[in-house]
Amino acid sequence: EFNSYAQSMVVEPPKMKELKEEDMQDNLIPKRHKTGLWGYVNSKKKFVVKPKFENALPFEGNVARVCHNGKWGIMGRNGLYILEPYFIDSLYEFSADSIAIFSAYENGMNKHGLINSNGWICQGLNYESIIIKPFGYLAKDYINKYTTIDKNGNIMLAKEFDNVLPLEDSSMD
């Protein structure tokens, strides 16, 4: 499902080259170039990932979210893509468990899924919405059924609930 959709995109993401070891160890910071594009600079304020992105966010652990042509991808500390920016329209902050909610516009609908920091899609574009909960995630599908998903992206209870009442944050730790 995802590969065929990603392959249908016509805009190639910018090419990447692997960084030198010392730059991989450095605290790379996103910086906007005078061209308006974003790249990453090292502690000497030198661009080590050339400005080629519409948006580039700070590293979260060993990964950073980058945007090209309105699509989001994941870049590793080595300067190479973990996930090329082909089909993801939104890629939210990674959790402490290295899982992020992503969304893509597909078949006239904005759909949501879960992806880990290795670029592995844990839960596909099967949900109308996903919210973060202390136990993991609560996902609502398009027929208003709820699924609970653990912090690793695995389904705990699938489409078991028609309604979900608010819970205290500590109730399902």
Image (cartoon, grey):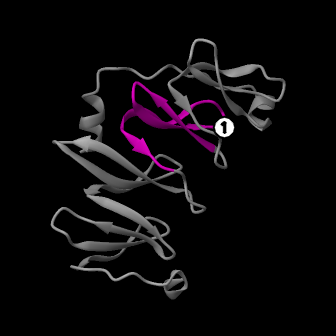
The quadrant in which residue 173 appears is: bottom right
Q: Is residue 18 magenta?
A: no
Which of 161 and 168 lies nearest the eye of the viewer? 168
The structure residue drawn at horizontal position 21% and vertical position 72%, both measured from the top left corner, is: 145
Q: Position of residue 115 (x, y in %)?
A: 44, 52
The structure residue drawn at horizontal position 64% and vertical position 17%, both measured from the top left corner, is: 33
Secondary structure mostly seen in the magenta stretch? strand
Q: Which region of the structure is painted magenta?
A: 63-92
Of all residues, the one furthest to the bottom in this rendering is 171
Mark 1 = which residue?
77
Q: Position of residue 68 (x, y in %)?
A: 45, 26
Q: Is residue 78 magenta?
A: yes
Q: Position of residue 6 (x, y in %)?
A: 30, 34
Q: Badge 1, how many Cα within 10 Å: few under 14, some, many 20+?
A: many
The structure residue drawn at horizontal position 30% and vertical position 73%, both measured from the top left corner, is: 147
Q: Secondary structure at mark 1?
A: loop
Locate the N terminus and report the quarter of the image it occupies.
top left
